Amino acid sequence: MMFESLVGYYDYGLIIILMVIGLYGMVIKRNLVKKLIGMTIFQASIVLFYVAGAAKWGATVPVYTPAIPNENIGNYINPLPHTLMLTAIVVGVATTAVAFALLILIYDRFQTLDELELRKRMQ
Amino acid sequence: MITRNLPALIPLLFLSGALSVFLLGLWRRRSGYPATLVFSMTGFFLSVYGFHRVLTRGTVRYFFGGWVPPVDIEFYYDLLAAFVLMVVNSVSLIVLMNARMGVAAELEGKETFYYTTVMLLLCGLNGIVLTGDLFNLYVFIEISSLAGYGLIASGEKKAPFAAFRYLIIGTIGASFYLIGVGFLYLMTGSLNIVDLAGILPSIPDNPTIIVALTLMVTEIGIKTAIFPLHGWLPDAYTYAPSVSSSLIAPIATKVGAYVLVRILFFLYGLEYFAIKLPVAQIVVVFASAGIIFGSVMAIAQKELKRMLAYSSIAQIGYIGLGIG
């Protein structure tokens, strides 16, 4: 039972692995750019989580055609999670842009992006 | 016309304010500040008028595009929202009235961009207070946070690093919130707070719903800086320009407390978080620890701004104690 549910939800397992890689990058890595890359991976895993949650076998795109009866809603995929993730991706891009602007400022002022070195120079 | 569309008008006012302050500031550098003041004052009067209207006529539910739940985006303008909105707009107006000298002294030549970011921050905060849709709430949280990072980073030499730490922590928090919303959506198929509050009692003791609550409270804890999640706050407030600190400290974290009230009382309801789950007890324990920690650390500081930062952690503890 345990094994079956693990195999049946393998996509979520992969998403969790991606999430952990992102968290590892943010917490362990000393370089600020690598922290930022970890953050981006973490956000990508959430996008995949929504898309995986909306996946459905034997359904089609949510555009109505007379050939496919819409009495049975199961014939169509729910488009809302994908739409939400479009917004989330845009927000993620904006966050990354602000973060890179901050990194440029930090590098201009301290000539390093290594966290420990940065703390030493800030003293 | 104005009264019917009042809930949507207030955030849109600040959004258009951001655009016009930017363009006016490019045209004449000195015109940025008066324009900011005009927009802030208009927002204040609109929110006072809205408070009066909600007080006399009752709750306003504004549906964008005329769609009804669960497919709509809704602005939910009840008495609590109207009151918090009035507080946010009046405090920001008072701060902006006194901002001119401070901004001119600390940010010579960058006033236009500064006031544009202030307008964006106010747009995000007003949106957080008004929205009745969980995903829309996430978008507004990110708008106000991004503006907040900008306002903090414009400070002295060490400010960008403090803002970067805040950005990483804040984005993890927002991502947690997004996962929580995803769990709720996959379980119920709705994102509307009023609609969800009706659905949730029909699926009691569901572990997914409980995990969603945990994730969302964690995010709000980070944004509100409740005690163990306050790590970003002292540095950010210390190195930010004084106008930014005085703008973000009183309203941004308190709007977070408002979101906590919304999610605990309006979305999950008293039974969920007080009787079935020890959420209220946990908030009380951490809030009490935060009061003691914040006060002790504030006494130990030599720098005035850092002392105020730790004191505001203690103040947030009092708010958490009240909610718990």
Image (tube, coloured by chain):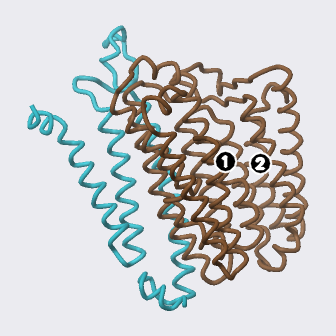
Q: Residue at x 85, y 54 (%)?
A: B93
Q: Residue A50: where, in percent of width, then height?
A: 36, 39
Q: Quadrant of the C terminus of chain A?
A: bottom right
Q: Residue at x 89, y 41 (%)?
A: B45
Residue under label 1, please give it. B255
- For badge 2, the amino acid type reads Val
Q: Is residue A37 above or below residue A18?
A: below
Residue B76 left/right relative to B230: right
Disc 1 to disc 2, C-alpha distance: 8 Å
Q: Which secondary structure, mark 2?
A: helix
Q: Nearer the viewer, residue B131 or B308?
A: B308
Residue sitting nearer the eye, B27 or B218: B218
Chain B palette colour: brown
User: Do the residues at pointers 1 and 2 share their chain?
Assistant: yes
**Would you say the residues marked 1 and 2 are in contact, meaning their CB atoms lie under 8 Å apart?**
yes
Which image quadrant is residue A69 in?
top left
Disc ID at residue B321: none
Q: Residue B65 in the image: state x and y as whole percent.
A: 65, 25
Q: Which residue is at 75% across, 61% downward?
A: B247
Identify the hue of chain A: cyan
Name which of mark 1 and mark 2 comes first in the sequence: 2
Query: Of the residues shown, which amino acid type is indicated by label 1?
Result: Val
Occupied quadrant, residue B75: top right
Q: Nearer the viewer, residue A60 or B298?
A: B298
- Left or right: residue A74 versus residue B272 is left
Position above or below: B254 against A98 = above
Q: Chain of mark 2?
A: B
Q: Which residue is mark 2?
A: B88
Q: Is residue B22 left or right of residue B294?
A: right
